Image: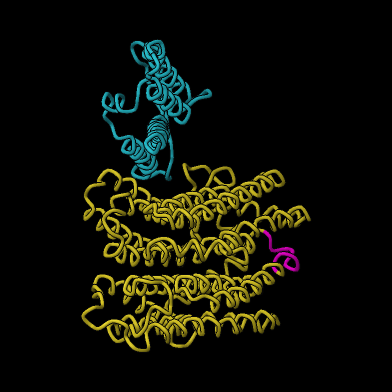
Amino acid sequence: MRINDVILQSVTKVVVFIIFTLAIYLFVSGHNNPGGGFVSGLILASAFCLLFLAYDTETIRKGIPIDFKVIAASGAFIVVACGLGSVLFGEAFLYQTFTTYTLPLFGETEFATVTIFETGVALAVVGVVVTIILSISEDV
Amino acid sequence: MNNMIVFPMILPVLTAIFLVFIRKHILIQRWISVIVMLANVGLSIVILLHVQTEGIMRLDFGGWEPPFGILFVADSFSMLLVVTTNIVTVVCLLYAMFSVGKEFEYMFFYSFVLFLIGGVNASFLTGDLFNLFVSFEVMLLASYALIAFGGKKIQLKKSIPYIAINVVSSWIFLVAIAYVYGTLGTLNLAHLSQIIAEEGQTPILTVISILFLIVFSLKSGLLLYQWLPASYSAPPTAIAALFGALLTKVGIYAMFRIFTLLFYHEPQITHMLIGVLAGLTLISGSIGAIASNDIRYIVSYNVIIAVGFILVGLAIGTNTAIEGSIYYIIHDMIVKALLFLIAGTMISLSGSPKMNRMSGLIRNYPILGWLFFIVMLALAGIPPLSGFIGKVLLGKGAIEAGSYVLLALSFISALFVLYSLLRIFMDCFWGETMLSAEDEPPLRKGILFPLIVLGVLTFALGLAPESIATFVIDGAETLVNPSIYIDAIFDQ
């Protein structure tokens, strides 16, 4: 007999968005404070885990039809390409730079190339963790 | 700043990631990986030539100057190994195209091979102890995937001890690095060398150096090789050839770097210990090589004998001996790849790895037979093949230094190598054919071509050792005089 998990499923629907928001917050704050791509990637992956637990893997995969291996690979690609990008500008491999712009709503905002790098890290982490969890669940 | 020297590492890695996106197009994957590795060969040769004219090159990642940032360093020794690695990889990839089969290729085979090569090249190029660890891990993670490929019972059985032993040794490696950082406060190799030379190699540092010795002995198969023969006999031929040719050499390279650049002040402890270990490896490897009836085990034990032989050069530590070791590493990478490829081909042709199940192969496959004969002579060190010059120089170095025991052991081991391979040659290639000509499976040209390339290379290296002599002499010079390396890192 199937257990009734209405409560878990309804709570998950709300909580997942809170977790996603926390992940994005940590990602953005990671530049000068604790946080960053790796942590936010892990938190994003934990949101996916919660979805997989509350529903089942088939439902979620139907709802989010992405191959997480490709996500991991694109993350890694962004990281390496970001490192190589500096070579194109005649700087040392992995060189990073930043600048500040004044935006209408946010005021003075700092833009750093390391954000691109961190995006890659976050994607790679999400892709790898979810792939691991899915392949373990497939074996059982 | 020389961005060029990051490419031998980054090209394979970038290609490996790219190949994940085109998983379904196996034909494109094959040719992209071969073409990229060929480009890598060309590029590394260019870097090697640059090093001759401009001296040791370095690249500070992100513009952070040593000793604060991490860096890549290219000197003659490391670039020679990078060039050889890339050449061997091209050949193994060509062999893999015709032999591994679609189901492997579909499971990211080429990506993993390229990740492995990225890790190997990074280990040769890094100028920083922690990055050496990271490169080792990149290489090992790819090798875990490659060794467990196919997921058959034998592969799982052989891969679990391999992974366990490597995880343990990586842990010891990390602990040793932490000790170094705790004691000296830096991990940059040149900076470490400078500090150790100024403040002396205190007993604690000698203990740490022995910890490193244990780690690299596990990785390279110096006496602590018990995991090696079983693990190297499990994966498909092309992968086994890459492992046999490259993985132990990375451990050997690390040992050469660490014990010539950092811990060279107490040779009566560290280098004597390396000498004892190398001697014992030669003895036990020789016994292993003649004890088995399984071709895969015999060739794996030949890897171990070569490890012992190369490290005799480090134990002696004179300029000539180290030159001999460098020659021998390059020779061994090429010839071991060839030996593993031939052994794998023999097994796939006859359907069994046991020697007594094969006979008279030379009647139907003459080229394979003669190639095996060439490999055998090359490994025994007979001129004009590539093993000769390394053995001569190493012997000369041993006589100069008066290490007659190591000299005797290393030359007697050559007889055991010859005997173990001669046994394969006589049992498997001579004698009556077990099958008639039409029953024998045909040997495809695509499989034979890579073998011939390596065969030609061993001849070329044996006939014209002067072609790489300047690089080898320069490499040995840098290893023997750490100040050259340090000056290259810290001058502006």
- Do we see residue B249 in this rendering? no
Q: Where is residue B402 in the image (x, y as percent from the top left)?
A: 71, 82
Horizontal side of residue A120 vs B473, given as left or right: left
Q: In this view, does B356 lie above or below B79?
A: below
State the residue in front, B120 or B340: B340
Residue B270 forms part of the magenta stretch: yes
Task: Look at 47% across and 84% down and name the residue there.
Answer: B423
- Do we see residue A29 in this rendering? yes
Outermost residue toward the right in this view? B203
Magenta part of the chain:
B263-271
Q: Position of residue A39 (x, y in %)?
A: 48, 28
Report which quarter residue B143 is drawn in: bottom left
Residue B266 forms part of the magenta stretch: yes
State the residue in front, B280 or B270: B280
Report which quarter residue B447 is drawn in: bottom left
Outermost residue toward the front in this view? A1
Horizontal side of residue B334 vs B438, given as left or right: right
Horizontal side of residue B53 vs A81, given as left or right: right
Task: Look at 65% across and 84% down and name the residue there.
Answer: B408
Q: Position of residue B209 (x, y in %)?
A: 69, 57
Color theme of the render: by chain
Chain letter matching colour yellow = B
Q: In this view, does A16 lie above or below B309?
A: above
Q: Is residue A25 above or below residue B474?
A: above
Chain letter matching colour cyan = A
Task: Look at 39% across and 73% down and name the residue there.
Answer: B343
